[in-house]
Image: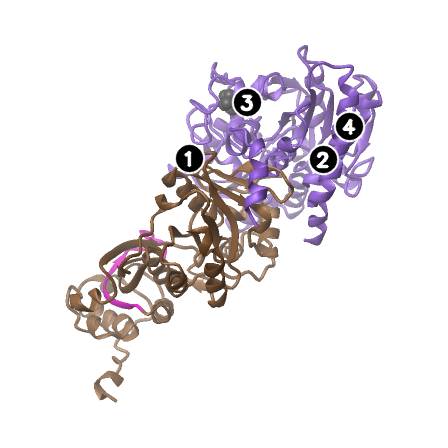
Chain colours: A brown, B purple
Amino acid sequence: MNPVRVLKPLRLLRDTQINMSHGSGGKAMRDLIQDVFVGAFDNPLLARLEDQAVIPLAELACYGDRLAFTTDTYVVDPLFFPGGDIGTLAVAGTVNDLAVSGARPLFLSCSMVIEEGLPVELLRRVVASMQATAAAAGVMIVTGDTKVVERGAADKLFINTAGIGVVRAGVNIAAANARIGDVIIVSGHLGDHGAAILVARNELALETSVESDCCPLNGLIDAILDVCPAVRSLRDATRGGAATVLNEFAQSSGLAMRIREAALPVREEVKGACEILGLDPLYLANEGKLVAIVPREAADSVLAAMRAHPVGGRAALIGEVCASPAGMVVMETSFGGSRIVDMLVGEQLPRIC
Amino acid sequence: MKYVDEFRDPEKARTLLAEIAVLVKSTSRVRNRPLQIMEVCGGHTHSIFRYGIQQMLPPEVEFVHGPGCPVCVLPMGRVDDCVALAERPEVIFTTFGDAMRVPGSKKSLLKAKADGADVHMVYSPLDALKLARENPDREVIFFGLGFETTMPSTAFTLLQAKAEGTKNFSLFCNHITIIPTIKAILDSPDLQIDGFLGPGHVSMVIGTRPYDFIAAHYGKPITVAGFEPLDVLHALWMVIKQIAEGRAEVENQYSRIVPRDGNAAALEAVQEVYEPREFFEWRGLGSIDHSGVKIREAYAAFDAERKFLVKTVSIADATSCQCGEVLKGVIKPQACKVFGTACTPETPLGALMVSSEGACAAYYNYGRIDISGLKRQTDAVVA
Ligand code: SF4
């Protein structure tokens, strides 16, 4: 064992709350970074503490032939919710944005905007979640930035993560690639994250145990690509839910997405909460679900591979790609009728009666 | 949720649809136009679109989407009042979610919030009262709207506020009542409606007795209906059966929830707190006598209209809007000159485009192209 690696940074930071000096560039900031971030993210690229992470190209090139690069900023209220927290989201979300291109996610950056007054302990918990999620996804957080803003200028904590990954050679995934006859598959229960956040905000007297589905999907996507490198389209169904992804597929490909309501996997408790609030689970956010379009011949093997993976157990075939109505999503309702599933205008707002 | 599944059984739907088709045939001998059935309530409009019920019906049956979305019929002047109240610095303005997007003459509540007004979305008027307790130095106003469905809960909230001696809570009362509205529709000279689906939630409060005049004086059948898709189909079957048999009665499909005489405790609270307004303006329909309620003198301390200067200016709807004709069933939403062009859910000109229960928004979101022929193909391809 290398004795140097065992020596984690000491608890340098004595403060219990973040204050403006932690963003000042001075010693307080250096202590915060050393103690909270370098300590937790624990990797040699970050530990150099340069202004950039320098990554040998050879290390990237062995995974594929194209670089994938993405960024996203995470703001969520509350910061902690059943099934995850803003840290889990910030890592899983960026990992997933890379993975749905067929890329192997490798390195992440982490940029924090912290509101003055945030308890240091809370920050430590978030950072621990980030590291746990990064470890689960097999990625490293190799560079970062910290800003502290005055009380009221931000809501507790905002996190931006950017990520790079490498796309497998031969894989070509795009929303426009769907073809008539392809099938549409979702990786599991829809709407869990959106429902968990609604419940966690505690605005409703709802007693449900639903947890966010927040998790990295790169393992599941690897499993899909292993059996079907010809996957046409892949997207994680985050804000706007599965309905929005399907509309994006329909618009990009100019084809119709036809789905069956009865085939949609939705938990009973999520359905129940939606009934009460007049919301539609198809539009609720997910943080660990994807929608895939694959050639019909591959449907069975893809479904089997997904169901064998821990986060794809409830994968389901929900519909297929057709010629008309071009650019639209049509759903056969569980009641036997049919209707258009459109893009949402603004936020879903609960109905009054 | 098993209870709900029972009301969504496609097998039962097929049986009902077959029977409806037979009944419609037997009535068509005396008619040369489709049967027009008005669902008064926005909740029914929502179910009809959400489950694709219109596409399942024979073409000789058409729904006319009535005035039953309280958000849609709110006149622009009243929305302006809301914005003016919300923009007072001492006020926390609370409202149900879907009222936030209704356009006023200058802005919606959502826009007012973005501009800095303290607008909170709540799920019940009791949440607003709670907010008042937690913010004793602010004035919390609850935007009360809706038919008899939501009237009792705001009444109970005022009763509780009075009992607690709350000083910083008031109601901006925009509640409306269903009976004068149905009467106004029945009196409309271009009326083409053959029968009604009565509102389920409203009837839970008022019972079915108040509808007797519809059958007795106007000779139109009405069936009070629940909101599950089978409820809607079943009630539709009951209304068409009445038409086929030449009857006009008040029937109750939703008897598991709706008693003939309504809910005594709720009605009592409503009586205690509100009295009819002489008239109330509806978007698209104009002013209807006694169609709104206001807060009684005894509860004046909780009346936002008395506490603050609310100067409701009547603002004419844009001339291109044909909301009134849609509401009365004279034209279908797509026939409106601006439907889907100048008027869309992103840029609603009329209120019917605002709430998901509004007929125009529902047509736009769920039914703006004819998808009836597509169903069989989906059947064939989805395993
Ligand atoms: S399309 Fe717009 S203006 Fe026309 S009736 Fe509908 S809501 Fe009113």
* Mark 2 residue type: Leu
Of marks 2 and 4, the one in the foreground: 4
**Residue at mark 1:** B112
The disc placed on residue B233 is 2
- Can residue B383 be seen here? The reply is yes
Is B207 left, or right, of B383 in this rendering? Answer: right
**Could you tell which of marks 2 and 3 lies nearer the N-terminus?**
2
Is label 4 or label 1 in front? 4
Magenta-colored span: A139-159
Which amino acid, mark 4?
A: Val
* Chain letter behind tag 2: B
Upstream in the sequence, badge 1 or badge 3?
1
Per the image, the residue denoted by label 4 is B22
Does the stretch in magenta take in A149?
yes
Badge 3 element: helix
Discs 4, 1: same chain: yes
Q: Nearer the viewer, mark 1 or mark 3?
A: 3
Chain holding disc 3:
B
Camera-near label (2 vs 1) is: 2
